C-alpha cells in the first residue's frame, strides 16, 4: 500500500537476485573426504562455536526436561510466546524479506524481526540469507548446502556446523552492510540474553524459557531442511520440496510447512495459497502492509 514513505526508513539496498555460478567448477565438490562422510564431532573451519552452542542448548535442554518435567503455566506461556515471536522473525524477517525480497519492510519492523530471529537462534541475517539463496539455487544438487541426499541428520542438523557456509559476498552482497553486520557482531550477546532470559522465574524458568525453547525452535526450523525436502517420489537431483500439512501444528501455523508451494514460487510473500493452507506469516505481512510497515508485497497470483 504505502510505498512512498520517508526514504530514510527504507532499507537502502539494491536487490540483486542470487547470482548464478561463475562456472560449474565453482560449485563442484572438492576432492577428498566430504563433510557428510566424517563423524558428527568434526566441524568446518570457523564453525566450532556453532557446534558448541548446539551441543550446549541440547545438554541444558535435556537437563531442564528431566529436572522440571512440569514447569508450570507461566513458564510454558512465556516460552511459547518467545517461540512464536521468534518464528515470525525467521519466516517473515529472514526468509520472506531478507532472503527472497518478497516483501520490503520498514527499517524499525525489519530491526525488530531480525532481533527476534537472532534471539530465537536463527543465526546472523546475512549468513542465513546467503545459505538459503544457495539452497534454492541448487536444491537437491551437489551444491545444495543442506540436501537430504546426504542423509536425514545431515539435512536436519549436521550441515549447520559441517557444511562450508555460503559466502555472504557472493550470495547476499545486498546484506553486506553495517546495519546487518551489527547483528552478526552482537549475535553472541543476544544469544546469551536469550539463554538466560528465564532466570527471574527460577531454575525451571531459566531452563525452559532458555535452552528447552531454543532446542524446540531449532528443530522446528530444521524440519524444513529435512522432512520438507524428503518427497518420496523425487528423482535424483530433482527439487524434493513438499507441503506437509501436519507440520503446521509444530510451526504454530506460521506457514513454512507449505515448502513445496514455496519452492514453486519463492518470490511470493504468501506461502499458504488457499484458505485452508494456514499461513500466519502471511497474515502478519498483510497486517504490516495495511499499517504501512511492509511495502512491495509479492503475491502468488
Ligand atoms: Zn527448501
Ligand atoms: Zn526460501
Image (cartoon, grey):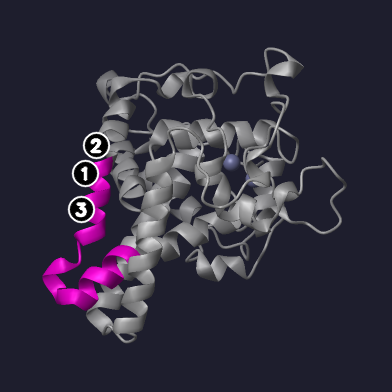
Q: Are marks 1 and 3 in contact (CB under 8 Å)?
A: yes
Q: Mark 3 highlights which residue?
A: 193
Q: Secondary structure at mark 3?
A: helix
Report if the beta carbon of the residue with label 1 is closer than 8 angstroms to ligand 2.
no
* Residue 189, numbered circle: 1
Is residue 64 at all visible to an observer of this figure? yes
Q: Which mark is residue 179?
A: none
Name the quarter showing ligand 2. Answer: top right
- 228 or 280, nearer to the observer: 228
Query: Is the Cβ of the residue at disc 2 closer than 8 Å to that at disc 1?
Result: yes
As drawn, 60 above or below 228: below
Residue 16 lies, with reference to residue 233, above or below; the image says: above
Q: Residue at x 15, y 75 (%)?
A: 202
Residue range (magenta):
188-212
State whether the magenta stretch is mostly helix, strand or loop. Answer: helix
Spot occupied by residue 30 in the image (x, y as percentages of width and height): 69, 26
Label 2: element kind: loop
Asked whether residue 194 is drawn in magenta, I would say yes
- In terms of secondary structure, where does tag 1 sit? helix
The residue indicated by pointer 2 is 186
**Residue positioned most to the left:** 200
Vertical order, 236 against 267 (above or below): below
Apparent side of residue 161 relative to residue 73 in the rendered image (left or right): right
Circle 3 Cα neighbour tier, 10 Å, few/some/many (<14 / 14–19 / ≥20): few
Rate crowding at label 2 as few (under 14), some (14 to 19) or many (20 or more) other CA atoms within 10 Å: few
Mark 2–mark 1 distance (CA, rounded to whole Å): 5 Å
Amino acid at each position: 500500500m504505502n510505498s512512498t514513505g520517508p526514504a530514510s526508513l527504507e532499507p537502502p539496498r539494491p536487490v540483486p537476485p542470487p547470482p548464478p555460478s561463475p562456472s560449474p567448477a565453482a560449485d563442484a565438490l572438492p576432492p577428498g573426504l566430504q563433510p557428510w562422510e566424517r563423524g558428527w564431532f568434526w566441524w568446518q573451519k570457523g564453525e566450532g562455536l556453532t557446534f558448541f552452542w548446539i551441543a550446549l542448548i541440547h545438554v541444558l535442554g535435556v537437563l531442564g526436561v528431566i529436572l522440571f518435567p512440569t514447569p508450570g503455566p507461566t513458564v510454558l506461556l512465556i516460552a511459547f510466546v518467545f517461540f512464536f515471536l521468534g518464528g515470525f522473525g525467521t519466516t517473515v524477517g529472514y526468509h520472506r524479506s531478507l532472503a527472497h525480497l518478497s516483501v520490503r519492510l520498514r527499517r524499525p519492523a525489519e530491526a525488530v524481526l531480525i532481533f527476534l530471529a537472532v534471539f530465537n537462534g536463527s543465526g546472523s541475517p546475512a549468513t542465513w540469507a546467503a545459505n538459503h539463496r544457495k539452497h534454492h539455487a541448487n536444491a537437491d544438487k551437489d551444491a545444495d548446502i543442506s540436501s537430504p541426499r546426504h542423509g536425514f541428520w545431515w539435512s536436519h542438523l549436521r550441515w549447520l556446523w559441517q557444511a562450508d557456509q555460503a559466502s555472504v559476498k557472493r550470495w547476499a552482497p545486498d546484506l553486506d552492510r553495517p546495519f546487518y553486520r551489527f547483528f552478526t557482531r552482537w549475535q553472541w550477546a543476544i544469544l546469551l540474553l536469550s539463554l538466560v532470559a528465564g532466570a527471574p522465574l527460577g531454575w525451571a524458568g531459566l531452563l525452559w524459557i532458555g535452552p528447552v525453547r531454543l532446542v524446540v525452535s531449532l528443530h522446528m526450523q530444521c524440519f524444513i531442511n529435512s522432512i520438507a525436502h524428503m518427497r518420496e517420489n523425487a528423482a535424483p537431483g530433482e527439487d524434493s520440496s513438499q507441503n506437509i500439512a501436519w507440520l503446521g501444528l509444530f510451526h504454530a501455523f506460521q506457514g513454512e510447512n507449505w515448502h513445496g508451494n514455496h519452492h514453486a514460487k519463492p518470490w511470493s510473500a504468501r506461502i499458504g495459497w488457499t484458505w485452508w493452507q494456514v499461513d500466519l506469516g502471511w497474515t502478519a505481512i498483510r497486517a504490516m502492509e495495511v499499517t504501512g510497515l511492509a511495502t512491495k508485497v509479492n503475491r502468488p497470483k
